[in-house]
């Protein structure tokens, strides 16, 4: 058969391969999800059909209910939901001083705390986005996150409940532990947190930054990880440093593992010359980038897992060689 007669067959073969390749191509990558917040035409992203002026529990939510719908995009959040909520002015004497009291302007569907208790979607009211309130806090904006929290957590004397202080004052143990830990058979399970250990501190300390915090909240190299674990400093499940690696939320003496901290917490802080000759310049430089001053500690802090004196805490992970190398890199 001549080459001229083969051309039609070759063209059909090439076309067939092209069709087969096109058929076997993976599906196009999904378009990025569009943020439905502040969009008046995206009601169907959360609930359908949207019932005008209906209560949250009477709407049809795409995720099953209002909280699960929010979690479909926001899997982790620093505040627990689906817990009993108490209205301000109702049974104040019965619920105890350490329980939150929700003001009337904040909805609590079925008597439970919900995402929409603190978040007020402006598009539902036909309102535009407020650039000063990007997280659409209810009754916001607030100068600090604490301003939002004090709507519910402010006691009669306008003092926000502090579980760390409550432990020091030895108040009702169950109520304090329940603030962070799950209840099992009406007793707090100290091995079970209400939310992820990385997020739980941010529930109250969202705006807290201190010198070196950003550099520490990361995955450790194998050497540092081994030293941290050998020294009893806990890490997140993925091996990263989190707030609880260096800070123990339980005051000294409040539980068996915190008894040893009674030996140094609150005592005068003396450090060896190496710590201040090497670390102080680094701390001052990083504090300047945050626009703050280094903490002028003169006493051992109450909530450190190990004393700063003698470089016990920092030296668990860092060796003098590590710190000198970091200092050289920072100067480049």
Image: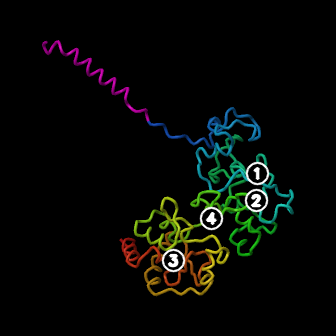
Q: Residues within 10 Å of mark 3 (few under 14, many from 20)?
A: some
Mark 4 and mark 2 lie on one chain; the one further toward the N terminus is 2
**Residue 74 pos. (x, y %):** 59, 48
Q: Which disc is residue 106 wearing?
A: 1
The residue nearer to you, when weighing 226 against 100, is: 226
Q: CA distance from mark 1 to mark 4?
A: 22 Å
Q: Residues within 10 Å of mark 1 (few under 14, many from 20)?
A: some
- Where is mark 3, residue-wise? 313
Colouring method of the image: rainbow
Q: Secondary structure at mark 3?
A: loop
Quadrant that contains the C terminus: bottom left
- Mark 1 in CB contact with mark 2 (< 8 angstroms): yes
Q: CA distance from mark 2 to mark 3?
A: 36 Å
Residue at figure coordinates x 56%, y 60% from the top left: 198
x, y percent for residue 222 = 40, 66
Give the number of the disc on residue 205: 4
Magenta stretch bounds: 1-28
Q: Mark on residue 152?
A: 2
Sequence-wise, the earlier of marks 1 and 4 is: 1
**Kind of element beneath mark 1:** loop
Residues tagged 1 and 4 counted as in contact (Cβ below 8 A)? no
* Lateral position of residue 217 relative to residue 82, left or right: left
CA distance for labels 1 and 2: 9 Å
User: Distance of mark 1 from mark 3, alpha carbons?
Assistant: 43 Å
Kindly indicate whether the residue at mark 3 contacts the one at mark 4 (C-beta within 8 angstroms). no
Q: Are marks 1 and 3 in contact (CB under 8 Å)?
A: no
Q: Is residue 285 above or below residue 118?
A: below
Does the magenta portion include 184?
A: no
The quadrant of the image that shows the N terminus is: top left
Return the disc, 1 or 3, that comes first in the chain's sequence. Answer: 1
Q: Is residue 8 magenta?
A: yes
């Amino acid at each position: 058969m001549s080459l001229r007669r083969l051309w039609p067959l070759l063209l059909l073969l090439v076309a067939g391969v092209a069709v087969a390749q096109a058929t076997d191509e993976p599906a196009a990558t999904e378009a990025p999800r569009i943020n439905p917040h502040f969009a008046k035409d995206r009601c169907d992203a959360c609930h359908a059909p949207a019932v005008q002026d209906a209560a949250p529990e009477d709407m049809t939510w795409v995720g099953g209910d209002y909280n699960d719908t929010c979690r479909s995009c926001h899997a982790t959040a620093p505040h627990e939901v689906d817990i009993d909520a108490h209205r301000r002015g109702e049974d104040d004497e019965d619920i105890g001083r350490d329980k939150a009291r929700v003001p009337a302007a904040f909805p609590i569907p079925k008597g439970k705390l919900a995402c929409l208790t603190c978040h007020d979607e402006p598009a539902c009211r036909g309102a535009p986005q407020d650039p000063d309130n990007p997280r659409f806090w209810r009754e916001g904006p607030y100068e600090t996150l604490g301003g939002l929290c004090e709507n519910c957590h402010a006691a009669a004397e306008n003092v926000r409940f502090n579980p760390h202080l409550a432990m020091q004052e030895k108040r009702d143990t169950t109520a304090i532990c329940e603030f962070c830990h799950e209840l099992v058979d009406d007793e707090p399970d100290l091995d079970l947190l209400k939310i992820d250990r990385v997020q739980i501190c941010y529930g109250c300390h969202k705006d807290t930054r201190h010198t070196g915090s950003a550099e520490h909240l990361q995955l450790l190299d194998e050497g540092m990880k081994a030293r941290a674990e050998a020294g009893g400093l806990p890490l997140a499940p993925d091996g990263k440093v989190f707030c609880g690696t260096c800070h123990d939320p339980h005051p000294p003496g409040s539980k068996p593992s915190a008894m040893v901290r009674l030996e140094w917490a609150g005592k005068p802080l003396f450090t060896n010359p190496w710590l201040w000759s090497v670390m102080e310049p680094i701390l001052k430089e990083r504090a300047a980038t945050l626009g703050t001053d280094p903490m002028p500690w003169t006493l051992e802090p109450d909530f450190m897992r190990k004393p700063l004196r003698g470089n016990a805490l920092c030296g668990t992970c860092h060796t003098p060689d590590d710190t000198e190398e970091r200092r050289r890199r920072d100067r480049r």
